[in-house]
Image (cartoon, grey):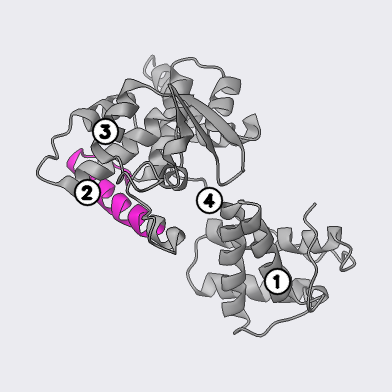
Amino acid sequence: MISVKLKHRYSLFNYTEALITRYHNLSQHRTAETYTATLNSFKKFRTNIDLDLNEINPPLLESYRSFLRHNNLSPNTISFYLKHLKSIYNKAVNEELIVDRKPFKQLTTATEKTAKRAISLHTIKQLKVLDCSHYPSECFARDMFLFSFYTRGMSFIDIAYLQKKNLKGDMLFYRRRKTNQQLAIHWEPCMQEIMKNYLSDPSSPYLFSIIKESDNNPQKQYKNAQFLINRHLKNIGKRLGLCLPLTMYCARHSWASIAYNEGIPLSVISEGMGHDSEKTTRIYLTSLKTEVVDNANRKILGLL
């Protein structure tokens, strides 16, 4: 349990900021970023007026949800903010800072089915041989996508923060910034080929030149790089005639889906991706399973 000492014990803003600092100190940066986004959203709703944690009640939450809807946010984004606001509230309850009045109990949030993000093995092969020699930025984007796929769907933030010391002989060791879980991956020739082309300056501790050692804001640097890479990937996706926007995150979904298609057990896929449970992996494969069922139905209907 994360214990937080507050200057203003019951202030939502101060409590959340203290949580964010603590998670950063624990190297759980993704959690810290999630709480930062949630806090910033709620501050906009409140026009930067703080409130006590025990002032969170059902009418306030309904008003916040209406505010999010009025700003044309998707049901999934609204659910994201409410879910993490609830998480912050529950942490304060667990710290015995407030009595649980269960303000979220009657709050229901609708979510939409996540669009399919996986691409086929055939498309991965197309990406490998794609000639983008006249567009170095597209080459880099394509190769970062492939590197993510080769490394069992490594998240871009983890690729950006990889250091040369993480590579030991024929093994790559790294810690997921989202969960702080350590993973080990056998270093394959295809990974070596990409590293050779983009190895950072000898004076830099990082494996790739995404984060500069001299830059004192690595978070901003990796986010800018991710934005540019995703923009180039979308252009590549259009060239390949893909019906979904190609992004770095597609590599992770694609590895899971292709592994599943190849008959690899769910437990192995879950372990390979660093998921805390197979339930998370099943979320990645939901659209794939739907497609399998649809194909089966189509086959049956074709018999009529």
The mark closer to the camera, 2 or 3, is 3
Reading the chain from its start, which is encountered first: label 1 or label 3?
1
Residue that numbered label 3 is attached to: 196
In contact (CB < 8 Å): disc 2 and disc 4: no
The reply to whether the magenta stretch includes residue 157 is no
* Crowd class of label 4 (few under 14; some 14 to 19; many from 20; radius 10 Å): few
Lateral position of residue 80 relative to residue 106, left or right: left
Which label is found at residue 112? 4
**Above or below, 180 relative to 214:** above
- Alpha-carbon distance for marks 2 and 1? 40 Å
Q: Amino acid at mark 3?
A: Lys
* Crowd class of label 2 (few under 14; some 14 to 19; many from 20; radius 10 Å): some
Q: Position of residue 91 (x, y in %)?
A: 78, 59
> Disc 4 on helix, strand or loop?
loop
Which label is found at residue 88? none
Reading the chain from its start, which is encountered first: label 2 or label 3?
3
